[in-house]
Image (spheres, grey):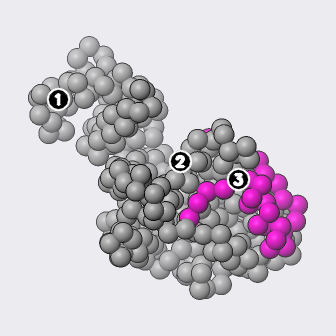
Amino acid sequence: MQLGLAFWGSKTLLSAVELGVFTELAEGPVEGAELTRRLGLHQRGARDFLDALVALGMLRREGSAYANTEQTGLFLVKGRPTYVGGMLEMANHRLYPYWGSLTEALRTGLPQNELKEGGELFANLYADPKGLEEFLSAMSGISLGAALALAEKVPWDRWRSVVDVGTAQGAVPVQLARAHGHLEVGGFDLPPVEPVFRRYIEAQGMAGRVAFHAGDFFTDPLPSADVLVMGHILHDWDLEQKRMLIGNAYEALPENGALVVYEAMIDDDRSHNAFGLLMSLNMLVETPGGFDYTGAQCGEWLREAGFREIQVEPLVGPDWMVMALK
């Protein structure tokens, strides 16, 4: 029953992010009646909504006033550098309705988004400035923890330069540049991403420290760097495209350069990392051929491309990292 009705709690959180509940509480506790007024809520459901967030561990209640928890204050206040709500905003506006057609996706093997009406996922996203900004912010939200872990776990003192492939706003390059002053850091993505990237970099105080490289990783050579990073990229594509991207990375790297792949990888036994398996179902809903994979599978593809000294290790949360040398 808890799992079957889990969407109740999920949608309550997603609506709270959409309404800006946590941002309204950024400066401290607010009386329930005042918070209801600020959020524009109807009296009938407001108290149950706010108290449900308390019961779900998303808010604290002090008398009749509501306040953020330590975690929601850190991660769900819009405008803070630690904000990860972009992923939840996209989950609310985009993934929640499309996942309503999961049964159809399982029966047909076909995506349930724009492609259902003959559109194209990334072309549609990148053509809509608001949708693009939300998507790129979502990528920052889901990558921030991994970015912090990458900055610690990869032996960056061995290399001088790194480019994050499919960088979105640039969350990974920012954290690498911040942690390792000797690194020449860049991000690679499609040209429409550049203005969003530059705004994010400036907001992070890293203007002039992180470079943007424009291009399409299927048609353009990847930038030259000692290390290339592909995070939450390979799972968007079918097996042939995955192998092509890995091969493109191999061609772009110098001898002894490294490719770092991170993803919510499925455990080799395919029975423990539920998030990785559910993410793979999300690729079914969202893409024509994308799927998530195990660390062993990724290592095999890297070996086929010519990489050596392949290491597979946990990164943070459901994310795992595979690192290999040319």
The crowding category of the residue bearing disc 1, from other C-alpha atoms within 10 Å (few below 14, some 14 to 19, many at least 20), is few
Task: Tell me if label 1 and label 3 are in contact, CB under 8 Å.
Answer: no
Q: Residue at x 48, y 51 (%)?
A: 141
Q: Which callout, 1 or 3, points at the residue further toward the start of the chain?
A: 1
Is 110 on the left-hand or right-hand side of 163? left
Write down the residue under mark 3: 294
Res 252 seen here: yes
Please tell me in which quadrant of the rendered image residue 171 appears. bottom right
Whole-number angstrom distance, CA of label 1 to CA of label 3: 44 Å
Q: Give x and y (percent) for residue 176.
A: 65, 57
Amino acid type of the residue tagged 3 in the rendering: Thr
Secondary structure category for the residue under label 1 = helix
| Residue that badge 1 annotates | 45
Q: Quadrant of residue 165?
A: bottom right
- Whether residue 69 is situated above or below residue 101 in the rendered picture: above
Q: Looking at the picture, which amino acid does disc 2 mark?
A: Leu
Q: Tell me the magenta residue range.
A: 290-317
Q: Position of residue 39 (x, y in %)?
A: 19, 38
Badge 2 is on which residue?
Answer: 278
The one of 14 and 72 positioned closer to us in this rendering: 14
Check disc 1 and give the amino acid type.
Answer: Gly
Q: Secondary structure at mark 2?
A: helix
The answer, for residue 161, to whether it is visible in the render is: no
At label 3, counting other C-alpha atoms closer than 10 Å, the crowd grade (few under 14, some 14-19, many 20 or more) is many
Note whether 83 is above or below 238 in the view shown: above
